[in-house]
Image: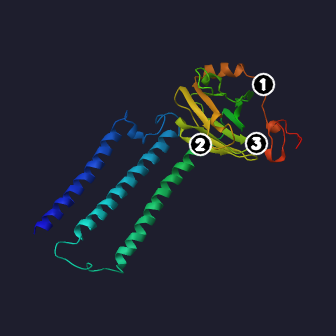
């Protein structure tokens, strides 16, 4: 009789612990200032037009995973307690095999879970990758070892910025020397992502989007910056010796400030004439060099 009481009390303790964990998660998510409400992601829900959707998918996926984990752990602990060897018992307990309903459930439930996760992931992916019909701003981003070129096409006006590799010395002021990408707030932008030499990856962590830059292929990101401020950007693909120094700044400014900045840049575009193929020992200008 006492063993049944212990089993019952332990089961109630597990239930209380599970409910407390879910309640704590729910309460933390209610606080807009708590990073747990955003799944500890960088930036804010309104940093770009896509960050809210991405944040919700991330947080809800983890909530679903936590619920599944709590149920799984509770079932395992229950089995260990309920079917443990009791005092005076010898040998193995009665074995149960070929429980067809249980095996069907264990097959169908994971398939349903994966299907639901795939459905919502696909919905968000399609939404954030929907291209703008005729954006006023197109930025052709060219990754190169180990810096960035930015070609701006704003309302038909073409300007460019040629980046120079950073020299990280650990001293103050180096950040200001990094290539800087300027974007107007609340203006839809299409990024055309290209690589001049090897595979790079365009990543602005606060924007929650990252995409590879592959030589000979143009990938795109479509978003609208919605928050003024300074953000960090970097290459997220190991691209050679100085990959860690392939950084850039992002400045989201007003439309007036953006137009004023464009006026300081040279006219035209830096196209693929500066691309090179390291496998063919080509130089920066694209002509064949010496072996």
Counting residues from the N terminus, which is met first, the one under dot 3 or under dot 1? Answer: 3
The residue to which callout 1 is attached is 267
Q: Residue at x 38, y 40 (%)?
A: 36
Q: Nearer the viewer, residue 261 or 86?
A: 86
Which structural element holds mark 2? Answer: strand
Observer-side mark, 3 or 2, equals 3
Which structural element holds mark 3? Answer: loop
* 107 relative to 211, above or below: below
Residue 166 at x, y percent in the picture: 67, 29
* 66 relative to 218, above or below: below
Q: Residue at x 57, y 31 (%)?
A: 232
- The picture quadrant where one finds residue 262 is top right
Counting residues from the N terminus, which is met first, the one under dot 3 or under dot 2? Answer: 3
Residue 209 at x, y percent in the picture: 56, 41
| Colour mapping | rainbow
Q: Answer yes or no: do the residues labelled 1 and 2 have beta carbons within 8 Å?
A: no
Residue 159 at x, y percent in the picture: 74, 27
The residue to which callout 2 is attached is 210
The residue to which callout 3 is attached is 197
Which structural element holds mark 1? Answer: loop
Residue farthest to the left?
A: 1
Alpha-carbon span between mark 3 and mark 1: 24 Å
Observer-side mark, 3 or 1, equals 3
* 98 relative to 190, above or below: below
Residue 114 at x, y percent in the picture: 47, 61
Q: Answer yes or no: do the residues labelled 3 and 1 have beta carbons within 8 Å?
A: no
């Amino acid at each position: 009789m006492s063993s049944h009481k212990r089993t019952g009390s332990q089961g109630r303790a597990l239930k209380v612990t599970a409910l407390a964990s879910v309640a704590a998660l729910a309460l933390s998510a209610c606080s807009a200032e708590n990073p747990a409400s955003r799944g500890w992601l960088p930036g804010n829900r309104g940093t770009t037009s896509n960050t809210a959707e991405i944040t919700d998918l991330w947080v809800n996926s983890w909530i679903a995973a936590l619920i599944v984990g709590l149920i799984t752990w509770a079932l395992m602990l229950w089995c260990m307690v309920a079917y443990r060897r009791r005092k005076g018992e010898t040998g193995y307990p009665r074995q149960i095999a070929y429980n067809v309903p249980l095996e069907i459930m264990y097959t169908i439930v994971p398939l349903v879970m994966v299907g639901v996760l795939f459905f919502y992931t696909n919905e968000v992916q399609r939404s954030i990758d929907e291209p703008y019909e005729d954006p006023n701003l197109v930025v052709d981003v060219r990754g190169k070892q180990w810096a960035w070129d930015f070609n701006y096409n704003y309302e038909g006006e073409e300007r460019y910025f040629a980046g120079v590799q950073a020299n990280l010395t650990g001293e103050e002021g180096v950040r200001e020397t990094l290539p800087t990408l300027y974007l107007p707030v609340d203006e839809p932008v299409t990024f055309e992502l290209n690589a001049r030499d090897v595979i790079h990856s365009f990543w602005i962590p606060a924007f929650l989007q990252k995409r590879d830059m592959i030589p000979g292929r143009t990938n795109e990101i479509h978003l609208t910056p919605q928050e003024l401020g300074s953000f960090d950007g970097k290459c997220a693909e190991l691209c050679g010796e100085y990959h860690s120094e392939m950084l850039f700044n992002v400045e989201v400014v007003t439309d007036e400030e953006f137009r004023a900045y464009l006026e300081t840049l040279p006219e035209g575009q830096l196209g693929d004439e500066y691309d090179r193929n390291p496998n063919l020992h080509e130089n920066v200008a694209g002509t064949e060099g010496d072996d």
